[in-house]
Image (tube, rainbow, N blue to C red):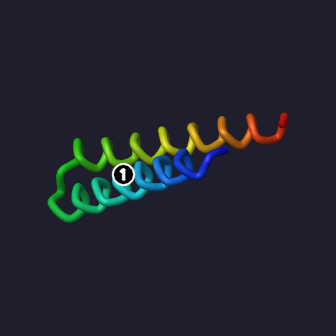
Amino acid sequence: MGIDDKIRNAAEEAGGKAKEGAGKATDNERLEREGKADQTSANIKQAGENVKDAFK
């Protein structure tokens, strides 16, 4: 996994956490769900990259 992929995935996860936190703070369920979805997406991408690394 390249360092740029790690940075992108970490940034996406951090953005998701920020969205989720903002959604909780403002009682905005849609924003909270979007944040959780962003985090899940980043984690799935990270897992895929880890699988690729394991087969190198």
Query: Where is the N terminus found, in terms of image quarters?
Result: top right
- Expressed as whole percent of the image width and height from the top left, the position of residue 46 reads 60, 44
- Expressed as whole percent of the image width and height from the top left, the position of residue 40 reads 49, 42
> Is the residue marked by circle 1 packed among few (<14), some (14-19), or many (20+) residues within 10 Å?
many
Foreground: 49 or 24?
49
Query: Where is the C terminus found, in terms of image quarters?
Result: top right
Work out whether 38 lies above or below 10.
above
Write the residue at 25% across / 60% down. 24
Left or right of residue 52, residue 8 in this image = left
Circle 1 SS class: helix
Write the residue at 71% across / 43% down. 50
Foreground: 7 or 13?
7
Work out whether 28 lies above or below 55.
below
Q: Residue furthest right?
A: 55
- Expressed as whole percent of the image width and height from the top left, the position of residue 30 reads 23, 42
The amino acid type found where label 1 is placed reads Gly
Q: Residue furthest bottom?
A: 25
Left or right of residue 30, residue 36 in this image = right
Q: Residue furthest left?
A: 26
Write the residue at 48% across / 55% down. 10
- Expressed as whole percent of the image width and height from the top left, the position of residue 33 reads 32, 43
Write the residue at 48% across / 38% down. 41
Left or right of residue 51, residue 8 in this image = left
Left or right of residue 42, residue 37 in this image = left
Q: Which residue is mark 1?
A: 16
- Count the numbered circles shown: 1
